[in-house]
Amino acid sequence: MVNEPVNNWKTRYLIIGAVTGALLGTLTAYLLERAADESGGDPPAIKTADVIKAGIGLIGVIRGIAALGEKK
């Protein structure tokens, strides 16, 4: 067998994505907690419509990032 160099860019991208997602999720939870503390300390009442809007926005961001990797 011929020793081929290991192309680990996929692993590196997965790790970067996982760490970035964890950091953004933690930041989001912190900001939500801080907003709840400032408005009386009760858990925030999040409406289903707001979750759907945020999800659609997130899908748009993910599609934009995925488009960066497409060849023209």
Image: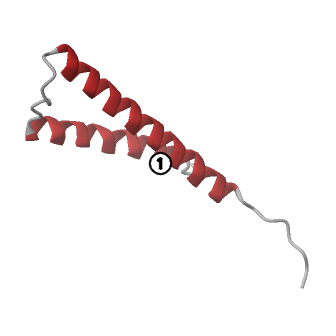
Q: Amino acid at mark 1?
A: Ala
Q: How is the image coloured?
A: secondary structure
Residue 19 place in picture, x, y as percent? 53, 44
SS at mark 1? helix
Residue drawn at 26 percent across, 27 percent down: 32
User: Which residue occupies the foreground of this view, 57 or 22?
Assistant: 22
Quadrant housing the N terminus: bottom right
Which residue is under mark 1? 66
Residue 54 shown left or right of residue 64 in the figure: left
In the rendered picture of this protein, how many numbered marks are placed on residues? 1
Residue 54 place in picture, x, y as percent? 23, 37
Q: Which corner quadrant of the image does residue 24 belong to?
A: top left
- Eyeballing the image, is 4 above or below 16? below
Residue furthest to the bottom in view is 1
Residue drawn at 45 percent across, 43 percent down: 21
User: Which residue occupies the foreground of this view, 28 or 9?
Assistant: 28
Residue drawn at 14 percent across, 15 percent down: 39
Residue furthest to the right in view is 2
- Eyeballing the image, is 53 above or below 42? below
Residue 37 place in picture, x, y as percent? 21, 19
User: Which residue occupies the foreground of this view, 38 or 70?
Assistant: 38
Residue 23 shown left or right of residue 25 in the figure: right
User: Which residue occupies the foreground of this view, 70 or 7?
Assistant: 7
- Eyeballing the image, is 66 above or below 42? below
Q: Which corner quadrant of the image does residue 56 belong to?
A: top left
**Callout 1 crowding tier (Cα within 10 Å): few <14, some 14–19, many ≥20:** few
